[in-house]
């Protein structure tokens, strides 16, 4: 099985290394050169995109996550079966999917007819991400989703919870995405407005991905174009 690995945190981020470990080193990495979190479905069409081949199976792209998916599927990788994006440092729950470059990469894959899975890790401060644990959980999830039907025009969005060290293994829960808005607030200093939304205080409608993830389980949603 040929896998394409990408992200929006940049090719040198620990999350994509954890993702590569989760698939036992398999897959071709085609990822942005720099951190592009929150870039949504932005594409590059009016200037050339520089691609640096770092190794036989690693490409650093001076473009967006969607650029990476497009280049991987059309130019760099033959006969891919899946596009995997992540592991993002931070949740991509509910309406986050409209902002997320992580999710956009697999949405583009679905548009181009290839199934995709976006994986993100919610950060419950002051905890820090244990990437070995995240990789282990991702292996579990991928093992299940690779066997699960993915209808044309759909893609998977996975959010890992943030648990205390030593906690039991989390359940994998298939659920619906939240449609509630993020908390939006700003600190004003003169003519400057600094965003100050408290992510952990967002709405937790029962049964939604926000509620499932915040409650300590792995939230898995099937999204449609």
Image (cartoon, rainbow, N blue to C red):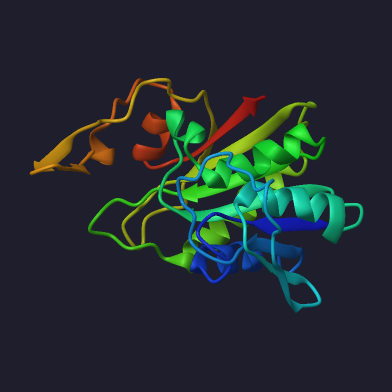
The residue shown at (50%, 59%) is 9
| Residue 3 x, y percent position in the rendering | 78, 56
Q: Quadrant of residue 178?
A: top left
Q: Quadrant of the C terminus?
A: top right
Q: Quadrant of residue 221?
A: top right
Q: Is residue 127 above or below residue 95?
A: below
- In the displayed orientation, state which residue is furthest to the left: 190
| Residue 92 x, y percent position in the rendering | 46, 41
- The reply, left or right, for residue 211 in relation to residue 99 is left
The residue shown at (65%, 46%) is 66
Q: Quadrant of the N terminus?
A: bottom right
Which residue is more in the foreground, 130 or 155? 155
| Residue 87 x, y percent position in the rendering | 54, 56
The residue shown at (37%, 30%) is 211
Which residue is more in the foreground, 45 or 81? 45
| Residue 224 x, y percent position in the rendering | 66, 24
Q: Is residue 148 visible?
A: no
Q: Is residue 118 above or below residue 155?
A: below
Q: Quadrant of residue 107?
A: top right
- The reply, left or right, for residue 25 in relation to residue 186 is right
- The reply, left or right, for residue 124 in relation to residue 3 is left
């Amino acid at each position: 099985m040929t896998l394409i690995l990408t992200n929006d945190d940049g090719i040198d981020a620990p999350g994509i290394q954890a993702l590569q470990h989760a698939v036992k080193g398999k897959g071709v990495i085609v990822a942005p050169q720099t951190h592009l979190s929150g870039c949504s479905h932005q594409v590059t069409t009016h200037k050339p995109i520089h691609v640096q081949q770092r190794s036989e199976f690693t490409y650093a792209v001076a473009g967006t996550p969607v650029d990476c998916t497009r280049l991987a599927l059309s130019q760099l990788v033959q006969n891919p079966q899946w596009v995997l994006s992540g592991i993002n440092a931070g949740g991509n729950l509910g309406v986050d999917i409209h902002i997320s470059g992580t999710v956009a990469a697999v949405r583009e894959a679905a548009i181009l007819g290839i199934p995709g899975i976006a994986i993100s890790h919610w950060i419950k401060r002051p905890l820090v991400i244990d990437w070995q644990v995240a990789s282990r959980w991702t292996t579990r999830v991928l093992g299940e989703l690779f066997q699960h039907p993915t209808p044309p025009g759909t893609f998977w969005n996975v959010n890992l919870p943030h648990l205390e060290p030593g906690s039991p293994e989390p359940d994998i829960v298939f659920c619906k995405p939240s449609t509630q808005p993020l908390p939006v607030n700003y600190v004003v200093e003169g003519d400057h407005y600094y965003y100050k939304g408290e992510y952990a205080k967002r709405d937790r409608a029962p049964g939604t991905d926000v509620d499932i993830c915040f409650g300590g389980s792995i939230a898995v949603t099937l999204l449609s174009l």
